[in-house]
Image: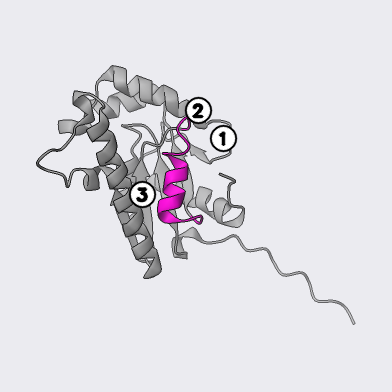
Amino acid sequence: MPSAPPAATTVPDPTATTLAVLLIGPAGAGKTSVAKYWADHRRVPTAHISLDDVREWVRSGFADPQSGWNDNSEAQYRLARRTCGFAARNFLANGISCILDDAVFPDRPVVGLGGWKRHVGPGLLPVVLLPGLDIVLERNAERRGNRRLTDEEVARIHGRMAGWYGSGLPIIDNSQLDVPGTARVLDDVLARAIASPPNW
C-alpha cells in the first residue's frame, strides 16, 4: 500500500496570529506610522503601544531629552518602557496582539532588548526598521514639537543603529517603501520569525 504523501509545509500567517512585535529604529525611520498602519490592518485584534505617547503622559515635570539627557529623562524612559511592557502583557493575556516601537540601541543590551524581553516576555519578536540616513533626516524635518531632533542627533542615532547589522535580527530598509509596503514586508519578516524565531 503506498504511503501517504508528506504534508505540505505551511508558512505561518502573521496576520492571523496573536503576536507581540517590537519595532526598532532611529527617529524618522517611520516606526510609529508603520506600527499604527500594521495594527489597523490585521485580521485579529491588535494594539499599537507607543513608547513616546506613554512617556508624554508625564505633563508636569516632563524631562525632555532635547534639552539634555539626564537622570530624570532616563528615569522617565525606564518607567514608560515598564508601563508599555505591562500593557503588552495585559493585551496578550486577553488574546490581543500588540506592536511596540522604540529606538533601542544595540550597544545597550541590558536596557534595550534585554529590558523589553523582561517587560513583555520571551515571545517578543524584534524587527529593525532602518532606512538610509538621508531618508531619516528628511522625515525628521517634517516632525513637530519635542519629537523633532537636530540633524546632528539624528545622524548620531542612525549611526548607532547600524550596529544591528550582523546581530541576527531581521532588518527592513524601508528607504524606497511607503507605509503599506513596509507593513507588507513586515508581515513577510514576521512569518519567517514565527517559523524560525531569531536568537536574541
Which of 38 and 200 lies nearest the eye of the viewer? 200
Along the line of sight, which residue is nearer the eye, 188 or 2? 188
| Magenta residues (range) | 106-123
Residue at 47% over, 32% down = 106
Q: Can residue 143 be seen here?
A: no
Gap between marks 1 and 3 measured at Cα:
20 Å
User: Does residue 118 show up magenta in the picture?
Assistant: yes
Name the disc covering residue 163, or none: 2
Residue on which the image places disc 1: 167
Rate crowding at label 2 as few (under 14), some (14 to 19) or many (20 or more) other CA atoms within 10 Å: few
Looking at numbered disc 3 in the image, what kind of residue is underneath it?
Answer: Leu
Residue 44 is situated, as x and y percent measured from the top left of the image, at 39, 66
Residue 69 in picture, x, y percent from top left: 26, 26
Picture coordinates of residue 144 (x, y %)?
A: 16, 32
Q: Residue at x 34, y 27 (%)?
A: 136
Residue 78: where, in percent of width, then height?
A: 31, 42
Q: Secondary structure at mark 2?
A: helix
Q: Are marks 1 and 2 in contact (CB under 8 Å)?
A: yes
Q: Which residue is mark 3?
A: 100
Looking at marks 2 and 3 on the same chain, the residue that comes earlier in the sequence is marked by 3
The color scheme shown is one colour
Amino acid type at circle 1 is Ser
- Secondary structure of residue under mark 3: strand
Instruction: Bin the neighbour count of mark 1 within 10 Å (Cα to Cα): few under 14, some 14-19, many 20 and up.
Output: few
Quadrant in the rendering for residue 15? bottom left
